[in-house]
Amino acid sequence: MNGKWYAGVPHLHTVASDGRLNIEQLVSLAKKNKLDFLIVTDHNKNCEKDLPTVDGLTLIYGTELTSSNGHTNIWGVKDSVDDFAVESYEQWKEAKDEAKRRGALVCMNHPLCGQCPWRWEKDISQVDVLEVWNSPMHYDNLLCTEWWHEQMKKGHKTPVVGGSDYHRDYYVTNLLTNPTTYVYAQSASPRDILAAIAAGRTTITSGVGKTFITITSGDAMLGDTVKLDEATTVTVDVKGLKRGHRLAVFDANGEYFSHTARKNEDFNVTLPVRGAGFVCAQVEYEVGRIYKIGYNKVIASKIPSQRNMDLPPFIYAQSGAMFFE
């Protein structure tokens, strides 16, 4: 492993669709937030102009194929789709297959969103990547995480990302990097960034420099498949674990290790691998009273079914998975 971790946002919008910032303003904001890459994904629109070359920041072509039945990010090619009028599942499959022939990666976005879910058949084998965490953490992302675990139990090895789905900030917010996807790549080139995402070398944080989870097994890392024997172990390493936050480690049989921090700390643990399947991890925290008030005002106003619900612990950091067979 001779690459490095790059921080980026794989889902955002500009004034070319319904975002509030132009590309120059986004570049400035990204550099202020110490990001390494951005993927521009305006709704139903290929990038009309060449993306600029920016020192210290990689810009990657993309689009969000958007219909009333589901949203799909398509990354890596400037002209990914010729016809965005996708009204049926068959039309969607034709469009995404054409994008893949042109060299694109395809990501299923926020499939269990209360506002704009994936209403077609949720066949994860049709996409390359799953957006398991969309925008600042909310209840729908917990449902999506559970669904991802169920897909892995069925043998799928779909990589995951978190996308802030950035449109604008409100007053004192800084939403561009919440969440941030870190990608372990050989370089910051678009080709290497996308290859690393496709390989599952991803971990998701609440922002640049915040709690960060990695998983290794010998020389193998996130995204890899390891041949299992009686001595196989997995090491979960957490940087910047906050006091009161809880690390939970999962495999195909459910949660099998947890640790609650009594102070701010870095933490790591080596565990036996209990059997074939997967290992992934997340850091959880209890939602505070003030946050619940804000959540009810902002989220529940858009998703009435979540109004005044008793919120479970939310995810603060989330790894991709390693696989064992």
Image (spheres, rainbow, N blue to C red):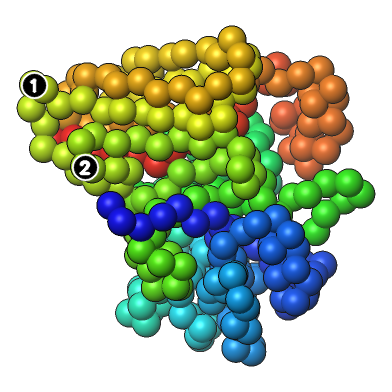
Q: Residue furthest top?
A: 262
Q: Which mark is residue 165?
A: none
x then y, percent, for residue 32: 74, 59
- Please report the residue visible at 30 percent of the width from the left and 47 percent of the height from the top: 223
Q: Residue furthest right?
A: 171
Tell me the SS state at disc 1: loop
On the image, which quarter does residue 63 sit in?
bottom right
Foreground pick, 215 / 297 = 215
Decide: is 200 above or below 215: below
- Quick check: can you spot residue 63? no
Q: Residue furthest bottom?
A: 49
The C terminus - image quarter: top left
Decide: is 273 above or below 216: above
Q: Which mark is residue 219?
A: 2
Q: Is residue 10 left or right of residue 121?
A: right
- Please report the residue visible at 76 percent of the width from the left and 19 percent of the height from the top: 288
On the image, which quarter does residue 234 sit in?
top left
Q: Amino acid at mark 2?
A: Asp
- Please report the residue visible at 67 percent of the width from the left and 51 percent of the height from the top: 177
